[in-house]
Amino acid sequence: MSIENQINELREELRGHNYNYYILDTTVISDYEFDMKLKQLQELEKKYPEFYDPNSPTLRVGGEITKNFETIVHEHRMYSLDNSYSREDLLDWEKRIKKLVDGEISYTCELKYDGASISLTYEEGVLIRAVTRGDGIQGDNVTTNVKTINSVPLKLKGDFPPKFDIRGEIVLPYDGFAKMNQERIAAGEEPYANPRNTASGSLKLQDSSETAKRPLDCLLYAITGDKLGITSQLESLRKARAWGFKVPIESKSANSIEEVLDFIAYWDEHRHNLPYETDGVVIKVNDLQQQEELGFTSKAPRWAMAYKFKAEQVSSILHEITYQVGRTGAITPVANLEPVLLAGTTVKRASLHNADQIEKLDIRVGDTVFVEKGGEIIPKIIAVDFQKRDLDSQPTQYITQCPECQTPLIRKEGEAQHYCPNYDGCPPQIIGRIQHYISRKAMDIEGLGGETVALLVNEGLIVNYADLYELKKEQVVPLERMADKSAGNLIVGIEKSKEIPFERVLFGLGIRYVGETVAKKLAKHYKFIDAIIEASEEELVNVDEIGIKIAKSVVEFFSSEKNKALIKRLQDYGVQLEVSAEKLANQTDTLQGQVFVISGVFEKVSRNELKKMIEDNGGKVSSSISSKTSFVIAGANMGPSKLEKAKALEISIINEDEFLSKVK
């Protein structure tokens, strides 16, 4: 047998043993025999480097050093899930989706594991990339570290598609977490707080051999890609298992919300017997064609819902109420608590939201309060234990002046929050606006973080985001913790931000109520910043999904001469304040004012490609048929009720070819 064949046979044998042990939980050979075979392979690979394989089992031990984790844009966005907490929530969700799709709806129920979300990309059955969820649009490339996790297959088996992404959670089992903490305590180190945060932190360790030492596991639950040949969620789970992925076996089909609730009730009681943290159940529409028809909101799929198990509750003592100032001037009261353990995390602070919430719950300093950590990341106070209240307790008087600049606070009619109106002179507002501008979803300036922004403002080097483009390296080098190389990277990062597309710049400007989705809508509609500056409230309201509140805020922002001067400076520095020529070349007004509903399965282009074509040519995509619908694009297996409704409303029904001829 040739050396190459010997090496390849050893690799395949070790992959098989890994699969048996980490996926099937069965042992075929002893640990000693496995180690001996692994050692043999390592020696052969070292002696014959010409047969190097980046996915060899020997690389599971890690050793590569990653200084900076590259940012990768997800080919298919990683959405978050909407949350529900009751039977009524789920029934309301079912009513909404039944209005949008035809036919009977069945569901899959899967446990919601609490770990670090990950997206794995495979091409020709080989792991190409592992990327963290990040903000859902882009994340960090952690491939080197993920390759050390034994339950992540480096090579697949079976009838896998040529290319796809699979999503899941990197988790740390309870027993592995306990063992890690025992070792840390024995070494005189602080124990880790909880499995989830430890798993997440493990993915960003610079030395992959350190990641390899941690007993991480990877549980997969969603396949994403084009033309995968899969028709249902349950089928996708079965196929993923067959290809070599670790897919939890607890998933189950359900034909009604009542069956879903039975699944939830069972696991709410039995979840503590599982080896991992789980905080709820994810319910998905099983049929993938129905999923496509339901589509997404700006934040979450309409076809899925997370049911959260009842939140943990603890009591603590409220020592002090402090007030934070946001970048918009909004004041947020914060409860400073006696430290208490809640859902595996030590909680010292909780949000009090606003003055109305404090008054409603009659929260006072010195109270014993009940703290809950439910669907929100930040804990909240839900009630006061009045039996333990001191007789001398005084009602909370909400502050009347900004805690940072002492400007009298204002509260607009119909709004819950108080605001500091000192837009140009309140330090947290100035710093916050610049931090928002440089954030990942906006300008994503490499080498510039929130602390550095605060340092630059406090040193008097900048007072707004336009000032960033006048910074010189020699100004930055003397700053605390800023070496010559770091200063150079910061200046390069600022220069590179001039390439960021218009819609992200528009989001970064920090106009109140203009989030990512609204910024995209405005950029696409107006194409140039000058056109948005000149737009009236009436004109803005006519833009898709722009309401009067957003329109007023946009007009107010651009009516400020200071803001217009900032925009002019950004233009002069070369920041992208118009849609690129390349994007404009792919956009037309051919379908302007027309509303399309897409239904069925298509042969030449995917549903997502159809949506993009409609939007690129000025049209709008709707999920349901109404009198405002211009055309229904019908593919194979179009739902009968949609067909009936379209005919009743005398709406034109066109096929795939007829639509494609429209946009040619």
Image (cartoon, rainbow, N blue to C red):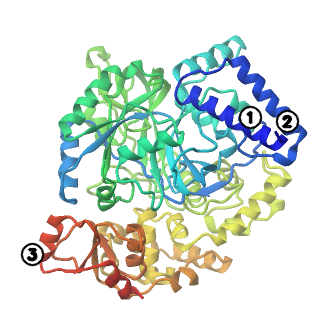
How far across and down, in percent of the image, does residue 399 sit? 40, 41
Residue depicted at x 24% and y 46%: 106
Quadrant location of the N terminus in the rendered image = top right
Q: Earlier in the sequence, mark 1 or mark 3?
A: 1
Q: Which image quadrant is residue 31 in?
A: top right
- Distance between the alpha carbons at the discs numbered 1 and 3: 66 Å
Find disc 1 in the rendering and name its residue: 10
Q: Is residue 437 left or right of residue 618?
A: right
Q: Disc 1, disc 3: CB below 8 Å?
A: no
How far across and down, in percent of the image, does residue 8 sit? 74, 41
Find disc 3 in the rendering and name its residue: 648
**In-front residue for pair 16/261:** 16
- Distance between the alpha carbons at the discs numbered 2 and 1: 10 Å
CA neighbours of label 3 inside 10 A, class few (<14), some (14 to 19), many (20+) = few
Residue depicted at x 66% and y 67%: 497
Q: Does residue 186 sit above or below 455 in this rendering?
A: above
Q: Disc 2, disc 1: CB below 8 Å?
A: yes
How far across and down, in percent of the image, does residue 381 sit? 35, 30
Find disc 2 in the rendering and name its residue: 44
CA neighbours of label 2 inside 10 A, class few (<14), some (14 to 19), many (20+) = some
**SS label for mark 3:** helix
How far across and down, in percent of the image, does residue 225 sit? 48, 58
Q: Which image quadrant is residue 288 in?
A: bottom left
Residue depicted at x 22% and y 60%: 100
Q: Nearer the viewer, mark 2 or mark 3?
A: 2
Q: Is residue 338 visible?
A: yes
Q: Nearer the viewer, mark 1 or mark 3?
A: 1
Q: Does residue 103 sit above or below 263 in this rendering?
A: below
Q: Does residue 486 sit above or below 503 in this rendering?
A: above
Q: Earlier in the sequence, mark 2 or mark 1?
A: 1
Q: Identify residue type, mark 1.
A: Leu
Residue depicted at x 32% and y 21%: 393
